[in-house]
Image: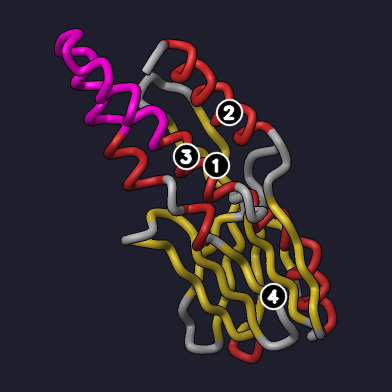
Amino acid sequence: MSLRVVKFCVVAFLLMCVTGCTQKVADAGTVVCSYQWWVGPVSLLVGVGLTAAGWANRKDGIRAILFLVVAAALTVGFAPFGFFDKVVVDKDHMESRWGLWCYPTTHHVRFDDVTTVRFTSEESTGRRGRRKINYYYEFNLKSGQIEKVTADNSLMEEAAGDLIAQLQQRGIPLIKAIAHE
C-alpha cells in the first residue's frame, strides 16, 4: 500500500468525524437517534485500509509494525461503534447504548420512576492541566438512586429536545444546576 492510500483513509476518517453523522427517526411516538447507515462501514473500511497499509509496509521497520498493531487494535475496538450506538426516547422511558462494542455504557430510565431531573456540569482536568466542562442529566429516581447520563454525547444532544418534551409532558421538573457556564 502506498502513502496515498494511508492519506485517503485518514482524510476519509477526519471528514466522517466533522460531518453530521447522526440521524433521528421518529415512528409512532418513539424517537431513535443513531449514527447514519454509512458511519459503521466507513469506519470499518478506514480501519481495514490503515491496517493493510501497515501490513504492506511492515518491512520498513518498527514504526510500520507499531502502526500495523495500533491500526488493527483501533479497528477492532472502535470501528463497530457506528453499528450499535443509539438513544431511544418514547412516552415511557429513555434508553441509551454507546461506547466500546464489547463493554458498552447503557442506561435505561423509566419515566414513571423519575421524580426530578437535574442538568449538571462537572469540571475535569486532563493530564496536561487542560480543563473541560462535562454536562450530565441526573435522573433522581423514587428509589433514592441517581442515574447519571452524559449529555455531551452527540446522540444525547440529538435526542435532548425529545427527552425534555417527554419530561415536560409528564410534569417532571428539569432543574438547571450548572456550576460552570
Residue 163: within the magenta?
no
Given residues 129 and 97, the one toward you in this image is: 97
**Identity, as a three-letter code, of the amino acid under mark 1:** Val
The residue wearing badge 4 is 89
State the CA–CA distance, disc 4 to disc 3. Answer: 31 Å
Q: Are discs 1 and 2 less than 8 Å apart at CB?
A: yes
Comparing labels 4 and 3, the label whose residue is closer to the camera: 3
Q: Residue 45 carries which label?
A: 3
Question: Please, is residue 8 above or below residue 141 in the view?
Answer: above
The residue wearing badge 1 is 42
Q: Residue 12 carries which label?
A: 2
Question: Which mark is first along the chain, 3 or 4?
Answer: 3
Comparing labels 4 and 1, the label whose residue is closer to the camera: 1
Q: Residue 9 carries which label?
A: none
Badge 1 crowding class, 10 Å Cα cut-off, few under 14, some 14 to 19, many 20 or more, is some
Badge 3 crowding class, 10 Å Cα cut-off, few under 14, some 14 to 19, many 20 or more, is some
Badge 4 crowding class, 10 Å Cα cut-off, few under 14, some 14 to 19, many 20 or more, is many
